[in-house]
Amino acid sequence: QSCQMCRWLVYISAEAIDLADLVLDARHSLVRQSFDAGSHPNCTAANNMRMNADGFGLGWYGSKHGATKAAVFRSITPAWSNRNLRELAGVVKSTCCFAHVRAATPGSVVSEENTHPFRHGRLLFQHNGHVEGFSRVRRRLVARLPDELYERVSGSTDSEHCFALVLAQLDDPGRATPFDVSELEFAVLRTIAILKELGAAEGITEGFSTCNFALTDGKSVVITRYCDKAPDIPPPSLYYTFRGVSEIRDSLRADADARLRPDYGVETKRGAAADAPPACGDKSPPRSREAPPPLPTDARPLPSDAAPAGATAFLCASEPLDEFGRSWTLVEENSILSYSSETGDAPTLLKARLEEMVDGATFSDEDDDADAEVDDRGVGATAVTDGLLRFVARLSTADSWRRKLLER
C-alpha cells in the first residue's frame, strides 16, 4: 500500500551555508529529487515518490530582526524549472533552512497556500506524509483549535492543519523568544497522539498515516519519522548527518559534474539527456537507474553524548544529498530526533518512546461532557494518561517546562 509522498531537507547550525549547496549543487540535491528521487538506501520504495513536481518551498532565517523571523518562498511550479529558485538560492545564506518539494496527495489542490513550509511567528513546519481519512477527522481536528489559530489556516491540506494543531500545544506560539527544545518535542508528539485518537474516534482502521514532521524556531529543530502501521508499513525514508560545516559544504560541492546547470540539466558536462529533468508539465515516471548502495550495516544513530570532532552542523533529508556512506544515518522508524544549535551537542534520538507515548496517551473528544476539565489548548486535561506523563518526564532536561507539563 502506498501514498503520494514528498521530499524535504533541514539544515541548522550556528554557521550559515549557501542555500544553493543544499537545493541546487549537491550530487543528489533537492532539485534533483523533484524529478529523480529514489535514492533511499536501506529503505524500500514504499511511501517514497520518484516524482515530486507539485510545487516547492523554501524557508530560512536571515539576520534582520535578530533572526527571529523566517522568510518563505513558495511556488506551484516544479522546482527544476523555476528560475527564481536558482537566482534566490544562489545568493542567500542562512544558519537554518527548510526546503520541500511536493507530491500532492491525490485530490489535493495544488496551490501556494498548500505548499510547504508553513510559518507562524518564528516557527517553520513541514511534513512528508499524510493523515489517513483526513476528510473525516478534519472537523474534529479544527474543533481542537483556538479561534486565532483556526483563522490562520489558509489552505486545505492535512499538513497545515497538523501545524495548527502543533501550535495549539504551545504556550504563546507566536512569541519572538526561542522555544526550549522540549517544548517543541512535546507539541509534536502530543499532536501525533491526538491525530491517532481522532482517527480511532472516526473508526478509521483501513489505510495508514505517516508523519515525517519537521518543526523549528531557527535555533532548535524537532523531527519525527513515524507511521501508525509500522513496521508492517514503513514511514517515508529520512536520514541525517552531523558534521562540520566546511566538511558538509565540501562534500556537497565535490562532484561539480553532477550539478544541474543554469539550463536546468538540458546540457551538462556529462552530455545531457539521461539525467535531464522532464519537460515542464511532464509527470511521467523518471527513467530507471541503478539502485543506490546500502548504508553500512553498523550505521546507528549517534549517542546523545558523543559528537564527531568539529561537528557543528545538523543536516537531515529525505534522501542523502551527497555520496552514501558512514556520514549519513538512517533515522529509525517511529522515533523523534532533536537538535539545538545553541548547545551544539550531538542530535538526540528517542527511539520507541514515541510509540509508547502515542499509544499511552488518550484524549477525550466529548466536548459536551460538562465534567471534563478542558485546558486552554482545547484538550481534556484530565484525559492525559500516565503513559504520556511518563514520556514527558523523560523529555529534554528543561526542568521548569517539564514540571509545568506534569502539573497540567
Image (cartoon, rainbow, N blue to C red):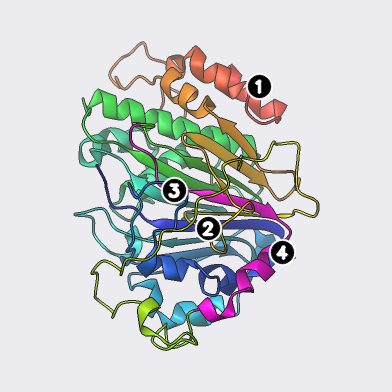
Where is mark 2, residue-wise? 320
Where is mark 1, residue-wise? 403
The amino acid marked with disc number 4 is Glu
Q: Is residue 114 left or right of residue 133?
A: right
The amino acid marked with disc number 1 is Arg
Query: Mark 1 Cα within 10 Å, few/some/many (few <14, many 20+)?
Result: few
Q: Earlier in the sequence, mark 1 or mark 4?
A: 4
SS of the residue at dot 2? loop
Q: Nearer the viewer, residue 42 or 278?
A: 42
Label 3 and label 2: CA atoms lie apart by 10 Å
Label 1 and label 2: CA atoms lie apart by 38 Å
Q: Earlier in the sequence, mark 3 or mark 2?
A: 3
Percent position (x, y) of residue 195?
35, 32
Circles 1 and 3: CB atoms closer than 8 Å: no
Q: Residue at x 53, y 58 (%)?
A: 320
Q: Residue at x 69, y 36 (%)?
A: 303
Residue 247, labelled with which disc?
4
Q: Nearer the viewer, residue 145 or 29?
A: 29
Percent position (x, y) of residue 73?
46, 69
**Vertical placement of residue 358 versus 286, above or below:** above
**Vertical placement of residue 381 versus 181, above or below:** above
Query: Mark 4 Cα within 10 Å, few/some/many (few <14, many 20+)?
Result: some
Label 1 and label 3: CA atoms lie apart by 34 Å
Residue 237, labelled with which disc?
3
Q: Earlier in the sequence, mark 1 or mark 3?
A: 3
